[in-house]
Image (spheres, grey):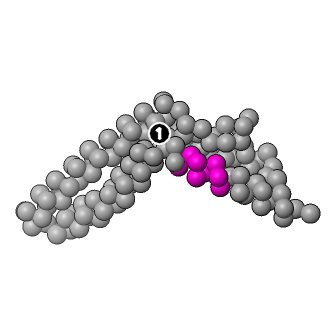
């Protein structure tokens, strides 16, 4: 079995991340499962909209620097644009399918609990 310190660290990590809107779910210490809430999903979608707006701004800045012929600024904006593309895609996946992601995480938690209980003699 996984000890209470592990569950406390998982709770602390996921509670902090859901409080700032990084993930649309949190961890319940009593049931030792991940749970979904409407508030964290709304907050998570807000940050998705903010990330898309920022990515749009970076895209137009990249086009502007390409048009005026500033290669250093163009390369910097292009790198930021690629990074924001990864951020927006990961946020959109977790925002679009939070229940499926919860099933996956709870399944992993059950699997690791069973494996850890079999490994301890």
Side of 33 relative to 78 (left or right): right
In the rendered image, residue 38, in percent from the top left (x then y), is placed at: 48, 31
Going 60% across and 51% down the picture, which residue do you hit? 105
Q: Residue at x 43, y 39 (%)?
A: 44
Q: Estimate the x, y position of residue 16 in percent, counting from the top left.
A: 57, 40
- Residue depicted at x 78% and y 56%: 114
Q: Magenta stretch containing residue 57, yes or no?
A: no
The image quadrant that residue 17 belongs to is top right
> SS class of the residue under badge 1?
loop
Range shown magenta: 101-108
| Image position, residue 23 (x, y; %) | 50, 44
Residue 85 appears in which quarter of the rendering?
A: bottom left
For the stretch drawn in magenta, what is the main secondary structure?
Answer: helix
Is 106 magenta? The answer is yes
Q: Badge 1 is on which residue? A: 21
Would you call the spot at circle 1 few (<14 residues within 10 Å), some (14-19), or many (20 or more)? many
Q: Residue furthest right?
A: 121
Left/right placement of residue 26 relative to residue 120 reads: left
Q: Residue furthest left?
A: 68
Residue located 58% across and 48% down the image: 103
Residue 23 appearing in the image: no
Give the x, y percent position of residue 57: 21, 49
């Amino acid at each position: 079995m996984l000890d209470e310190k592990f569950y406390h660290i998982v709770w602390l990590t996921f509670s902090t991340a859901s409080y700032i809107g990084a993930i649309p779910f949190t961890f319940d210490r009593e049931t030792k499962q991940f749970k979904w809430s409407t508030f964290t999903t709304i907050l998570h979608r807000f940050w998705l909209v903010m990330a898309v707006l920022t990515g749009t701004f970076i895209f137009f800045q990249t086009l502007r620097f390409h048009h005026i012929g500033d290669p250093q600024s163009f390369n910097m904006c292009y790198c930021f644009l690629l990074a924001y593309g990864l951020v927006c895609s990961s946020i959109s996946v977790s925002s679009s399918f939070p229940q499926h992601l919860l099933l996956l995480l709870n399944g992993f938690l059950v699997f690791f609990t069973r494996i850890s209980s079999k490994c301890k003699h």
